[in-house]
């Protein structure tokens, strides 16, 4: 995955609580094994009217949020099933950070494994940022190194596990993290007795 340092751009408001993974990406679209191609189905049931046409009232269908990189939303975001497709769809749509008062634990972890930054702020801070995101032409900055979120008239800090932060800053997913120990792995294989099965 790509290293994450500073995310700067438009923030989109989604003032809803308990958004579960089936609302983020409905189950009928979970037919791919690769991570790409899910963005068009993001919030599918909310983004379309009963006839299946795009609903212009839905926030992500509005031109002012077409290039949004941060989503500001309510508590318990990403609850429900543990499908990895939910963060995949958010990232494929173009989001690089999600700001909420709280996240479902598995969803939070799945985000960090693909370079999508989950930012936890207080309820009051999220409400203030939601108001900023609701204004067209807003610019919000998420700085992972300093663990801050800022916008005009707004600044807040957020917690993140040091190891998770290290992996995000350096673009290390689980495979890349393993490969940083390549010399140790090779040395172990060299010491492996010949009578044991060959690893590939």
Image (cartoon, rainbow, N blue to C red):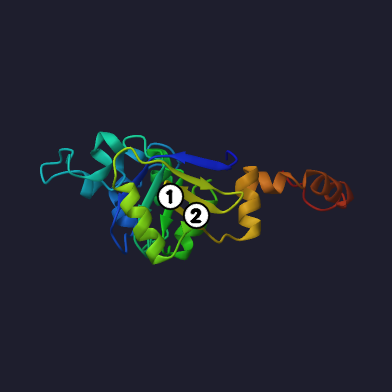
Q: Residue furthest front?
A: 153
Q: Nearer the viewer, residue 134 or 58?
A: 134
Q: Is residue 34 visible?
A: no
Instruction: Tell me the element at label 2.
Output: helix
Q: The N terminus appears in which quarter of the rendering?
A: top right
Q: Sequence-wise, which precedes: disc 2 or disc 1?
A: 1
Vertical order, 43 against 121 (above or below) = above
Q: Is residue 53 visible?
A: yes
Q: Nearer the viewer, residue 154 or 90?
A: 154
Instruction: Check residue 189 in the rendering and tell me which mark sits there, or answer none.
Output: none
Residue contact between numbered discs 2 and 1, judged by CB atoms under 8 Å: yes
Which residue shows up at 84% across the image and 51% down it?
188
Q: Where's residue 39, x and y in %?
A: 35, 40
Q: Where's residue 141, x and y in %?
A: 48, 44
Q: Where's residue 79, x and y in %?
A: 37, 63
Which residue shows up at 47% across the image and 62% down it?
106
Q: Residue furthest left?
A: 51
Crowding at dot 2, Cα within 10 Å, few <14 / some 14-19 / many 20+, comes out as: some
Which residue shows up at 43% across the image and 49% down it?
87
Q: Nearer the viewer, residue 90 or 159?
A: 159
Judged left or right of residue 121, residue 14 is: left
Judged left or right of residue 115, residue 30 is: left
Label 2 to label 1, Cα distance in Å? 7 Å
Vertical order, 157 against 177 (above or below) = below
Which residue shows up at 57% across the image and 54% down it?
147
User: According to the image, label 2 marks what residue?
Assistant: 110
Crowding at dot 1, Cα within 10 Å, few <14 / some 14-19 / many 20+, comes out as: many
User: According to the image, label 1 marks what residue?
Assistant: 87
Count of labels shown? 2
């Amino acid at each position: 995955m790509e290293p994450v340092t500073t995310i700067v751009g438009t923030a989109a408001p989604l003032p809803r609580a308990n958004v579960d993974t089936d609302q983020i990406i409905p189950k009928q679209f979970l037919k791919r094994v690769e991570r790409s191609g899910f963005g068009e189905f993001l919030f599918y049931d909310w983004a379309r009217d009963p006839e299946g046409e795009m609903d212009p009232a839905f926030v992500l269908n509005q031109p002012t949020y077409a290039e949004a990189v941060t989503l500001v939303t309510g508590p318990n975001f990403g609850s429900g099933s543990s499908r990895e497709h939910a963060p995949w769809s958010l990232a494929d749509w173009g989001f690089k950070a999600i700001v909420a008062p709280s996240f479902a634990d598995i969803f939070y972890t799945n985000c960090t494994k693909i370079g999508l930054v989950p930012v936890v702020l207080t309820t009051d801070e999220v409400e203030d940022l939601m108001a900023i995101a609701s204004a067209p032409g807003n610019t919000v900055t998420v700085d992972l190194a300093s663990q801050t979120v800022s916008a005009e008239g707004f600044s807040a800090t957020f917690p993140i596990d040091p190891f998770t932060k290290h992996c995000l800053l350096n673009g290390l997913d689980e495979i890349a993290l393993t490969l940083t120990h390549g010399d140790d792995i090779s040395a172990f294989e060299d010491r492996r007795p010949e009578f044991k099965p060959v690893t590939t």
